[in-house]
Amino acid sequence: MEPEPDAEDLRISLAPCPHYRMVGEDRAIACGIHAKIVRDLLSQVPGPLELDRLQPYVEATRCQILLREHRCRDAADTPDADDR
């Protein structure tokens, strides 16, 4: 695959996908594995990004990984002991 990152849109296009000939459940399994790899890689490096979603086959042989900034709960969202 030849990743084409777009830092402004937090998108990575992947083409050609070596699995584009797969169909049905096999295709879903391949996409799920790719999404898991991206999640695992992002969890191992410092930074504000996480996987938003993987868009399979936006074109015949091209998939897209969409990222987003990681949302952390801040102290204001955490209930106090008195609220329990």
Image (cartoon, grey):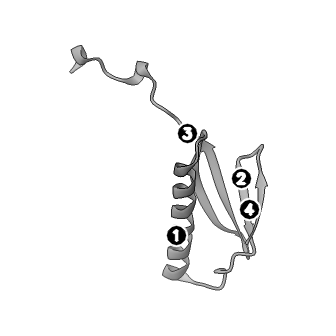
Residue 81, horizontal then vertical, whole percent: 24, 18
User: Residue placed at 64% from the left, 80% from the top?
Assistant: 19
User: Which kind of residue does numbered mark 4 sit on?
Assistant: Ser
User: Residue placed at 53% from the left, 56% from the top?
Assistant: 39
User: Residue placed at 57% from the left, 67% from the top?
Assistant: 34
User: Which kind of residue does numbered mark 2 sit on?
Assistant: Arg
User: Which kind of residue does numbered mark 3 sit on?
Assistant: His
Residue 49, horizontal then vertical, whole percent: 60, 44
| Residue tagged 1 | 33
> How far apart are the two marked residues, 3 and 2, measured between alpha carbons?
15 Å
| Residue tagged 2 | 11
- Element type at mark 1: helix
User: Which kind of residue does numbered mark 1 sit on?
Assistant: Ile
| Crowding near the residue tagged with mark 2, few <14, some 14–19, many ≥20 C-alpha atoms within 10 Å | many
In the rendered structure, are the residues bearing label 3 and label 2 in contact, judged by CB atoms less than 8 Å apart? Answer: no
Of callouts 1 and 3, the N-terminal one: 1
Of callouts 2 and 1, the N-terminal one: 2
| Residue tagged 3 | 70
In the rendered structure, are the residues bearing label 2 and label 4 in contact, judged by CB atoms less than 8 Å apart? Answer: yes
> How far apart are the two marked residues, 3 and 4, measured between alpha carbons?
20 Å
Residue 83, horizontal then vertical, whole percent: 24, 17
